[in-house]
Every structure is written in structure tokens, then in C-alpha cells.
Amino acid sequence: VFPMMMPSMAPTSIVTVLAAILFNVMNGFVNGMSLASETYQDDDYLSPTFFLGVLLLVGGFSLNVDCDMRLASLKRRLPMHKQTEGSSPASCYGIPTGGLFELVSCGNYFGESMEWIGFAVMART
């Protein structure tokens, strides 16, 4: 979510873009094959395990979006200049606060991990 919310501050290599595309295609293929090979019954979607997975996935997504919004807000408030010799690194960087950042240092990664755990619980993989 986060990269779509911020203007690019640095050029991105085509190798990075291609690697990201390749990773997502492979990830989608592996997940799709795993889901297609599993036999699900109609009542599987009513099980407590499925609802727990949905709750984890939606909760993780909400945390991820909240943390991404906090990071985007922090980035917009910071000066957009490069560090020059003699300037403090603190003048270019900020530490996110509030929300999940009060409990963990990388709340967005925690939220994304929670999403994937929820997906795994839902899919029984």
C-alpha cells in the first residue's frame, strides 16, 4: 500500500521493478496452485477456523494501512533535501509514533505478517 501513497524520491532501477514483478507472479502461482489442489467443502466457509483467518487477515490489513498512513504522513512532514556534509541525519529522518508503532518498530511489517497468517489459517495451508 505504502509505495502507491508516496511520490518517488529516488530513481528506481528496472532490475528492481522486474524482480518485484517476477516475485509477485511466482507468489501468485504458488498460492493459486496450492488453493486449486485443496478440496474444500461448503461448510468449510462456516467453520470457526475460517472466521479466525478472516479476522486476522482483515485486522492485519487494517493495521498495515494505518501504519502506512502514519509513515506517509511522516515522510510528507520531513524536509525533502538530501543530507549535506555537516548536516545532521536527524534533519532528514523521522521516527514514526502512534498506533502500532508504540508497541513495535515496524508496525506495517507486523500487519502484513498478520495478513499472511490469516490467509494461511483461512486456506488451511
Image: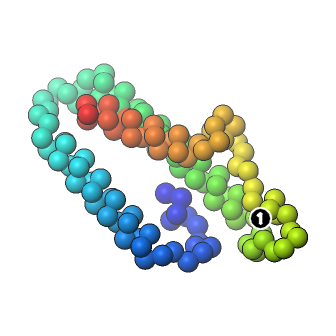
Crowd class of label 1 (few under 14; some 14 to 19; many from 20; radius 10 Å): some
What secondary structure is found at the residue carrying circle 1?
loop
Residue 70: image location, x then y, percent: 65, 52
Please name the residue that numbered disc 1 is placed on.
92
Q: How many marks?
A: 1
Evaluate whether residue 99 shows in this view: no
- 53 lies above or below 90: above
Residue 76: image location, x then y, percent: 70, 65
Q: In which quarter of the view is residue 56 placed?
A: top left
Evaluate whether residue 40 shows in this view: yes
Q: Residue at x 69, y 62 (%)?
A: 75
Q: Residue at x 86, y 69 (%)?
A: 87
Q: Residue furthest right?
A: 86
Q: Is residue 26 left or right of residue 94?
A: left
Residue 74: image location, x then y, percent: 70, 57
- 63 lies above or below 20: above
Q: In which quarter of the view is residue 91 placed?
A: bottom right
Q: How is the image coloured?
A: rainbow
Q: Is residue 31 left or right of residue 2?
A: left
Q: Residue furthest front?
A: 85
Q: Amino acid at mark 1?
A: Cys
- 96 lies above or below 93: above
Q: Residue at x 29, y 53 (%)?
A: 27
Say which quadrant the C terminus sits in: top left
Q: Residue at x 77, y 64 (%)?
A: 92
Q: Residue furthest top?
A: 48
